[in-house]
Image (cartoon, rainbow, N blue to C red):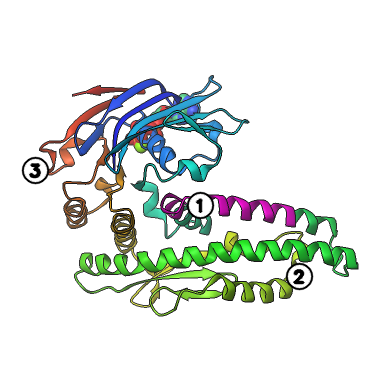
């Protein structure tokens, strides 16, 4: 997979910018607040249809403007694909693939697959469960675009179910018609939620084996990484020991869980369990890394996860995803930097941002295209 051309109009601090990627390795150099991360964010948006750092689409539009455009020409399976996004809130964003309008996210996703490793990812373990859910949801959506539709459907069902719970006004003694209405929404959320949990377990099991191997290597064979899916429905799913549960089995547990939680949900007027409350846990040598791992160990975990994602995507799609490294190299020590740069190899399109090019090993700079980013403008060097 290769991004040949990228064009931004009124995206963040870019009024209009065009960039052509000529070599597999590109470095964007610039002082702070010039637009390096904004450019990486636009590429991420093309791959995921949401930002990893904006709270909403309006934030992405240049101040004073009403819409933003991201366009790209991407090579996928030896074929060039033109992607167009117009961000125009409150309207739905306009999506086009080869000039043909796409009505659903799932029809657009999958044309560009990225692995993004930015400085904020280093906080993945310490961050909130919603950060970890965003990571897994974005990753799965790129590989299985239908996942995004299922996730949106689940969220819609949840909002409607919450509205119904609110109508009960905290009274747990439901009338027959209230029970019937709740039953209908329960059936829907169980089916939809079980499917998401099943897909997350499946994804994490693939990532676990690859990440564990890389983690072991970086830690000189001393540390064993274990990933668990911490579900409010099924309990902890050990990605090494446990078999992936089929959706029907998850649905059985869901049904029990939801009837146990009924009174609490009515009192709180909200859906208190389900994939929107699940989390991912990481253990090093059996100890929960969130509370006990040092900063360096946490970085090793995130590095291992990102490299595991690269491998897994390659194994499924038979193509390398595009790797985005935003400010992250300077945060890794020499041995982790070397491991990362060596692992990338020659064939992966890699776009790196930095404030200081002198941090790079000279051998890495051979055959690299370097661009200067200055006040929302890109200049060749
Ligand atoms: N919607 C927007 N409209 C206009 N400018 C924006 C918008 N959103 C962000 N900016 C500006 O874009 C500038 C560049 O941000 P960016 O995060 O890309 O910087 P950077 O080059 O990555 O810097 P650093 O080295 O500090 O990470 C910031 O000054 C920010 O205020
Ligand atoms: Mg930045």
Separation (CA) of disc 1 from disc 2: 30 Å
Which label is found at residue 363? 3
- The answer to whether the residues at label 1 and label 3 have Cβ atoms under 8 Å apart is no
Label 1 SS: helix
Residue 342: image x %, image y %?
A: 16, 53
Which label is found at residue 146? 1
Locate residue 299 relative to residue 262 in the image: left or right: left
- Closer to the camera: disc 1 or disc 3? 1
Quadrant location of the C terminus? top left
- Image point 31% across, 60% down: which residue? 308
Locate residue 63 relative to residue 282 in the image: left or right: right
Count neighbours of disc 2 (C-alpha within 10 A) and say few if under 14, some if 14 to 19, many if 20 or more: some
Q: Which residues are magenta?
A: 138-161
- Image point 36% across, 66% down: which residue? 206
User: Does 142 appear in magenta?
Assistant: yes
Res 51 visible: no
Please tell me in which quadrant of the rendered image residue 123 appears.
bottom left
- Which image quarter has ligand 1? top left
Dominant secondary structure of the magenta stretch? Answer: helix
């Amino acid at each position: 997979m290769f991004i040949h051309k990228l064009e931004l109009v009124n995206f963040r601090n870019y009024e209009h910018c065009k960039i052509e990627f000529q070599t597999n390795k590109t470095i964007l150099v610039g002082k702070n607040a010039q637009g390096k991360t904004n450019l990486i964010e636009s590429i991420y948006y093309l791959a995921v249809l949401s930002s990893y750092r904006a709270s909403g689409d309006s934030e992405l539009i240049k101040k004073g403007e009403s819409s933003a455009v991201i366009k790209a020409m991407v090579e996928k399976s030896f074929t060039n694909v033109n992607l167009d996004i117009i961000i125009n809130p409150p309207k739905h964003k306009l999506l086009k693939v080869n000039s043909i309008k796409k009505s659903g996210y799932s029809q657009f996703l999958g044309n560009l697959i990225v692995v993004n490793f930015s400085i904020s990812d280093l906080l993945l373990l310490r961050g909130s469960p919603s950060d970890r859910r965003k990571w897994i949801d974005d990753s799965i959506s790129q590989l299985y675009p239908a996942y995004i539709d299922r996730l949106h459907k689940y969220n819609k069902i949840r909002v409607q179910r919450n509205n119904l719970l609110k109508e009960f006004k905290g009274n747990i003694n439901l009338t027959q018609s209230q029970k019937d209405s709740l039953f209908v929404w329960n059936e829907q959320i169980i089916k939809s939620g079980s499917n998401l949990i099943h897909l997350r377990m499946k994804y994490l099991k693939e990532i676990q084996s690859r990440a564990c191997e890389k983690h072991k290597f970086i830690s000189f064979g001393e540390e064993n990484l274990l990933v668990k899916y911490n579900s409010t429905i099924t309990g902890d799913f050990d990605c090494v020991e446990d078999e992936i549960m089929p959706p029907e089995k998850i649905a059985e547990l869901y049904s029990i869980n939801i009837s146990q939680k009924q009174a609490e949900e009515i009192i709180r007027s909200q859906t208190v369990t389900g994939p929107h409350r699940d989390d991912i846990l990481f253990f090093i040598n059996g100890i929960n890394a969130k509370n006990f791992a040092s900063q360096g160990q946490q970085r090793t975990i995130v590095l291992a996860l990102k490299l595991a994602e690269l491998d897994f995507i390659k194994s499924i799609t038979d193509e390398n995803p595009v790797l985005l490294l935003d400010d992250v190299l300077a945060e890794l020590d020499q041995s982790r930097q070397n491991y990362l740069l060596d692992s990338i190899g020659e064939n992966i399109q890699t776009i790196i941002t930095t404030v200081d090019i002198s941090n790079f090993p000279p051998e890495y700079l051979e055959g690299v295209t370097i661009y200067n980013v200055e006040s929302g403008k890109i200049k060749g060097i």
